[in-house]
Image (spheres, rainbow, N blue to C red):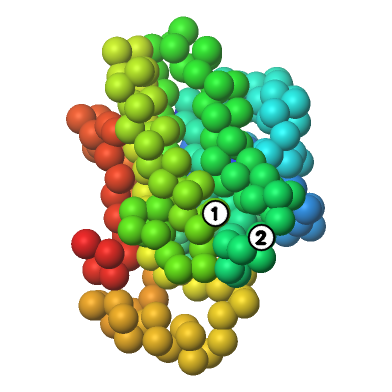
Amino acid sequence: MSTVLITGASRGIGAQCALLFAQKGYDVAVNYNHSAEQADALVQELCSCGVRAIAVQADVSDSMQVSKMFQTVKAELGEVEILVNNAGVARVGLLTDMTDDEWDKLISTDLSAIFYTCRAALPDMIRAHRGVIVNIASMWGEVGASCEAAYSAAKAGVIGLTKALAKEVGPSGIRVNAVSPGVVMTDMMQGFSDEDIAALKEETPLNVLGTPEDIAEAVLFLACDKARFITGQVLSVNGGMVI
Ligand code: NAP
């Protein structure tokens, strides 16, 4: 069975993607940075689905750590056929209050990391003439969010990278797409008050907030052969908030 590597899979959307892929019979590499216990517990759960799964620590904003992560995954589970670039951080605040370090950290985690992982994954995919990359963007990368300029810029970059890379590697049999979530209830929303969350729900035409399952189903669809004719696309999963 195919091996899928999911970055930032210890919690939230990434963890749900890992579970769904395992339930469908894929072997799964669970990347994490700090949440070792959660990653290990998830791996146990994935193995109980009858697939092989490992937890692999790497800060994906560091290209050397990404290279080592790919070596580990290849040695333990074989070549990565499906790469889900999910790891991400958000930061809310005025642009004028942002330091150089905060800017660099966000851009390196949410955008440069995808360059590092794609660069590491592609040689094997090109040789196999087969592979799928799904990048997690954000609706704020499509339209921009006030007080989230760096996050919006990084996610817009993810969308641009997705479209460009799809053209570059399509002739090699590799598809590259993005899923662009709306508001999804994970730890990333912890900084928002109940009133803020209620307002976001109100603003969403379907009047519901997203769940990690909503996003994972879209990722699985783009990764599997049902989407064989789809590449370079951004699948917005946002309850109609950004159309
Ligand atoms: P989350 O619950 O905060 O989880 C973030 C995950 O990313 C964690 O597993 C974390 O790992 C990992 N991570 C962060 N920095 C990392 C690094 N440097 N190296 C490796 N892993 C790292 O976030 P989420 O809501 O599931 O978000 C997942 C993705 O969806 C992100 O790209 C986010 O921007 C995007 N998204 C989320 C929403 C939303 O409303 N939640 C909306 C649009 C887009 P550790 O805990 O192990 O450090």
In the displayed structure image, the side of residue 41 where residue 179 appears, left or right: left
- Residue 150 circle label: 1
Instruction: Tell us which disc is closer to us: 1 or 2.
Output: 2
Percent coordinates x, y for residue 135 in the rendering? 45, 41
Percent coordinates x, y for residue 196 in the rendering? 48, 85
Q: Is residue 163 visible?
A: yes
Pointer 1 with pointer 2, Cβ within 8 A: yes
The three-letter code of the residue at mark 1 reads Ala
Does 64 appear above or below 224? above
| Mark 1 secondary-structure assignment | helix
Percent coordinates x, y for residue 163 in the rendering? 33, 32
| Mark 2 secondary-structure assignment | loop
Viewer-closest of 215 and 177: 177
Judged from this view, the residue extending furthest toward the top is 127
Does 215 appear above or below 191? above
Viewer-closest of 184 and 46: 184
Kindly identify the residue that appears in the image at 30 percent across and 22 percent down: 167
| Residue 15 sits in quarter | bottom right
Kindly identify the residue that appears in the image at 52 percent across and 63 percent down: 148
Cα separation, mark 1 vs mark 2, equals 9 Å
For ligand 1, give the image quadrant.
Answer: bottom right
Q: Is residue 181 visible?
A: no
The three-letter code of the residue at mark 2 reads Met
Q: Which residue is mark 2?
A: 98
